[in-house]
């Protein structure tokens, strides 16, 4: 089975463990005919026990454009009895080559996060 064109991986940098069972959503961002921003939900899932979400979209479903991956980090921290400052992490990126794989890692703590384009 071919992998999803967008995958993600969450690591809890405070615990030194994968961020498991985090709700993840992928949106395509566009503009309406009058120039107003618009978004369309393409997929949703949850990170697995290893903090990965690898089955969000079927291969070949993306086009050149702007996309957003949203992580419901508030639910994750609440489930662990921890407070957080960022209840949602939204990572917006431009997808130039739809045939390529886009991996979005998220290094997470209750009061900070870091991301980069992974491989």
Image (cartoon, rainbow, N blue to C red):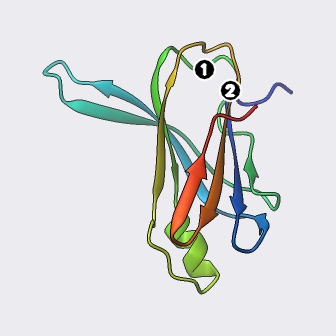
Q: Quadrant of the N terminus?
A: top right
Residue 19, relative to residue 77: is it above or below? above
Q: Report if the CB atoms under discs 1 and 2 are less than 8 Å apart.
A: yes
**CA neighbours of label 1 inside 10 A, class few (<14), some (14 to 19), many (20+):** few
The percent position of residue 7, horizontal first and vertical second, equals: 69, 38
Determine which quarter of the picture holds residue 78.
bottom right
The residue that label 2 is drawn on is 5
The percent position of residue 93, horizontal first and vertical second, equals: 49, 31
Q: Residue at x 54, y 14 (%)?
A: 96
Q: Residue at x 17, y 23 (%)?
A: 35
Determine which quarter of the picture holds residue 113.
bottom right
The percent position of residue 21, horizontal first and vertical second, equals: 69, 64
The residue that label 1 is drawn on is 61
Judge depth for marks 1 and 2 and give the one in front.
2
Q: Residue at x 63, y 50 (%)?
A: 45
Determine which quarter of the picture holds residue 81.
bottom right
Q: Residue furthest bottom?
A: 81
**Between discs 1 and 2, the one toward the N terminus:** 2
The percent position of residue 63, horizontal first and vertical second, equals: 52, 15
């Amino acid at each position: 089975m071919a992998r999803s064109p967008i995958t993600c991986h969450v690591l809890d940098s405070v615990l030194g463990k994968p961020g498991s069972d985090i709700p993840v959503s992928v949106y395509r961002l566009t503009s309406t005919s009058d120039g107003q921003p618009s978004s369309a939900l393409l997929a949703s899932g949850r990170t697995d026990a290893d903090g990965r979400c690898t089955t969000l979209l079927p291969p070949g479903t993306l086009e050149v454009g702007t996309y957003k991956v949203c992580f419901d980090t508030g639910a994750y921290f609440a489930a662990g009895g921890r407070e957080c400052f960022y209840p949602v992490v939204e990572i917006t990126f431009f997808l130039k080559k739809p045939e390529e794989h886009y991996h979005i890692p998220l290094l997470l703590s209750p009061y900070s996060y870091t991301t980069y384009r992974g491989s």
